Image (cartoon, rainbow, N blue to C red):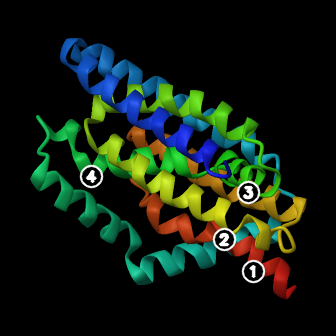
Amino acid sequence: MMFFGVFINTLAIFTGSIIGLFVNKGIPLHIEKALMKALALSAIYIGITGLSSGENTIVIILSMVIGVTLGELIKLDKKINQIGDKLEKRFPGKNDSDSLSKGFVVGSLIMAVGAMSIVGPLESGLSGTHTILLTKSVMDGLTSLILASSMGIGVLFSGVLVFLYQGAITLFASGLDTILTDSMINDINAVGSLLILALGLNILEVTKIKVMNFVPAIVLPVLFFLFY
């Protein structure tokens, strides 16, 4: 099954989120805050270690600059938050930290951005093996549990975005095989790592970066290589 890895990854997010929602009722506030700080530091670590994969510094810089310009022009961050706000009206949180839109955005960025989210579906689509996505499933299951216990049901909805995103890559993997190179994937990973690093800083409330507006930067390394 070509989509086996994607299904398992999505199921892990749903399962972790549901468990997190139930666990939330018995977790003291100070432990919730500590878990979020642990997750933020882990995101920063993942971001920093992923930066070393970049091969073309100028491509990464231009991708970030052009990507955030596009994101600001189309107001991507605002639109994503509006989706979360609409869902939140149907599934209101208990408090500000339990914001559906916040959980949706943070969960989507952590579990949809990064090398494994790209390389994993490619592996599934091109070779029919799912080693990377199965590994990612374990990580995402734990991540969604921690996030959902602190941020609520929005994390569960981020699983839908992860499914559509990774499913699309898997579906078109055969066509991408003639386009993607190791160098492209490495630069995409570096750009994604910058976004994860920014996300970690946001969770720690060190910065207030609209990370979603940078998401278009992830695909730009491919365009640079195609027209370079």
Say if mark 2 contacts mark 1, CB within 8 Å.
yes
Q: Considering depth in this image, is 135 or 225 the residue closer to the camera?
A: 135
> Is 90 positioned to the left or the right of 191 in the image?
left
Q: Which type of secondary structure does the marked residue at label 3 adopt?
A: helix
> Is 83 positioned to the left or the right of 106 in the image?
left
Residue appearing at x 73%, y 50% in the figure: 124
Looking at the rendered image, the disc whose residue lies closer to the viewer, 4 or 3, is 3
Q: Which mark is residue 219?
A: 2
> Is 216 positioned to the left or the right of 173 in the image?
left
Find the distance from the CA under tag 4 to the CA under tag 3. Answer: 31 Å
The residue to which callout 1 is attached is 223
Q: Which mark is residue 125?
A: 3
Looking at the rendered image, the disc whose residue lies closer to the viewer, 1 or 3, is 3
Find the distance from the CA under tag 2 to the CA under tag 1. Answer: 7 Å
Q: Considering depth in this image, is 64 or 106 the residue closer to the camera?
A: 106
Find the distance from the CA under tag 2 to the CA under tag 3. Answer: 19 Å
Q: Which type of secondary structure does the marked residue at label 4 adopt?
A: helix
Q: Amino acid at mark 1?
A: Leu
Residue appearing at x 42%, y 33% in the figure: 144
- Crowding around mark 1 (Cα neighbors within 10 Å: few <14, some 14 to 19, many 20+) is few
Judged from this view, the residue extending furthest toward the front is 1
Q: Position of residue 125 (x, y in %)?
A: 73, 57
Q: Which type of secondary structure does the marked residue at label 2 adopt?
A: loop
Looking at the rendered image, the disc whose residue lies closer to the viewer, 2 or 3, is 3
- Crowding around mark 4 (Cα neighbors within 10 Å: few <14, some 14 to 19, many 20+) is many
Q: Position of residue 28 (x, y in %)?
A: 23, 12
